[in-house]
Image (spheres, rainbow, N blue to C red):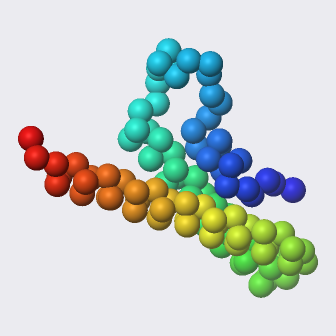
Amino acid sequence: MKDITLVSHLQSIVGPHSANPAIQTGAGFSDMLDKAVSETSRAEIAADQAVEKFSTGESKNLHEVILSLEQADISMRLLVQMRNKILDAYQEIMRMQV
């Protein structure tokens, strides 16, 4: 069974933490957003496939179908909240006087 908590989802997006974040090189902000969108897309596709398998009788486990749907829902909610926070930050920056 997969762990579908918010913390585990964020850790899968961000990756392992190092002792000094200033030393970390690699993925930037756009890479993190791209990964979040692709993870959400994969979760949605997996949920759709689980529902399709259940409706055709290929799978008999309703519990796994519901879990995959909830995981996709949580992933989408997280992505929407990230978008909202990014837009809020952008609007706040645009209101700043230089």
The residue at 17%/54% (across/down) is 95
Q: Which residue in the rendered view is the most extreme toward the left? A: 98
Where in the figure is residue 49, as x and y percent of width and height? Answer: 69, 70
Q: How many marks?
A: 0
At horizontal 70% and vertical 72% (from top left) the residue drawn is 69
Q: Nearer the viewer, residue 55 or 94?
A: 94
Residue 65 horizontal/vertical position (percent) = 79, 73
Q: Is residue 28 visible to the viewer in this orientation of the structure?
A: yes
Is residue 7 or residue 54 the one in the foreground?
7
Q: Answer with the quarter of the image where residue 75 lies.
A: bottom right
**Residue at (46% x, 30% y) in the render:** 27
Question: Looking at this view, is 92 or 74 the one in front?
Answer: 92
In the figure, is residue 73 to the left or right of 97? right
Q: Confirm whether residue 45 shows in the render.
A: no
Residue drawn at the location 52% of the way across and 50% of the way down:
36
**Does residue 90 appear to the left or right of 79 in the view shown?**
left
Q: Is residue 59 left or right of residue 77?
A: right
Whether residue 35 is situated above or below residue 28 in the rendered picture: below
Quarter holding the N terminus is bottom right
Residue 78 sits above or below residue 10 on the image: below
Q: Position of residue 93 (x, y in %)?
A: 22, 49
- Compared with 95, 27 (above or below) is above
Residue 17 lies, in percent from the top left, at 63, 28
Which residue occupies the extreme right position in the image?
A: 60
71 lies above or below 22: below
* Residue farthest to the top, as pictured: 23
Q: Is the C terminus in the top left, top right, bottom left or bottom right quadrant?
A: top left
